[in-house]
Structures are given as structure tokens and as C-alpha cells.
Image: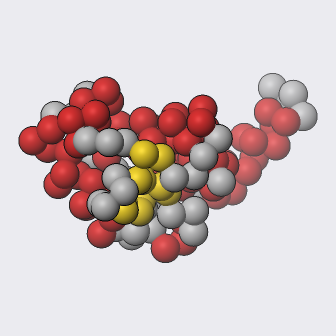
Amino acid sequence: MAKKVTKRFSISHFSKRQGKIMGYLLNLTLNSQRYNIHIPTLKDWENCGISQSKIKQELEQLVEMKVIFWDKDKMEFSFNVNTDEWQAKLLECFSEDRCQRILKMNKSSEH
């Protein structure tokens, strides 16, 4: 899950706030080893630097973009691991060939 999410995150256009939300959620996901993360209140998102007055709008936009799921009754959040469904624009400068070349180079220690 983490590889797919981080790859798509790194090649997609997100606002600074959205990036902070995704980084915080990914950190909690990896460190708890759970896909569904319980964050009891919107105020708790201040831990990633986003005020209570802004977080709801940003979360709803990420849900609309099909990047995350938000169960409002349980206050649980998770990534949509089907990153092909994400409705986030890819960076125009991204090159899959260049990415694979750099990855291959680093895996084989040829630098």
C-alpha cells in the first residue's frame, strides 16, 4: 500500500495543506500498521499544522478527489489504495522512464 500511495503522491499535484494531510495520515498508517486511522476530532488535525477552521474543507476535497475515505460517523480515515482512481492531476514534468532509470541505478548502486 505505502509504495503505491507514496509514488502517486510524489507525481501528483496537491496543495500544501493536502500534502500535510496525506503525510500525517501516511505516518499514522505506517506507524500503527492499520489502514483505517481513527482521529477523534477535526481539532486533532492541528497536529499536522492545519487549523480546525480549514481541515474539513481540505478533507472533503481529498474525498471528492477519491484520494482518501472518511467515515464521518466513526471519524476514521484511510487512503484509497486504488491510486488509478485518484482524481489528482499528474505533474506535467513527470517521466516514468526517468523515474525507473533512477530507481534502477540506485538499486544497483551504479552512481
The location of residue 66, given as percent across then percent down, is 40, 68
The vertical placement of 51 against 100, above or below, is above
The vertical placement of 58 against 102, above or below, is below
Question: In this image, 77 relative to 64: left or right?
Answer: right
Residue closest to the far bottom: 85
Question: In this image, 66 relative to 102: left or right?
Answer: left
The location of residue 82, given as percent across then percent down, is 57, 69
**Residue 23 image-quadrant placement:** top left
**Residue 104 image-quadrant placement:** top right
The vertical placement of 107 against 65, above or below, is above
The residue nearer to you, when weighing 63 against 111, is 63
The vertical placement of 55 against 95, above or below, is above
The location of residue 52, given as percent across then percent down, is 15, 38
Q: Is residue 15 visible?
A: yes
Q: Is residue 89 visible?
A: no
Residue drawn 28% across and 34% down? 44
Question: In this image, 15 relative to 67: left or right?
Answer: left
For the N terminus, the image quarter is bottom right
Residue drawn 28% across and 36% down? 45
Residue drawn 9% across and 41% down? 53
For the C terminus, the image quarter is top right
The location of residue 58, given as percent across then percent down, is 23, 52
**Residue 39 image-quadrant placement:** top left
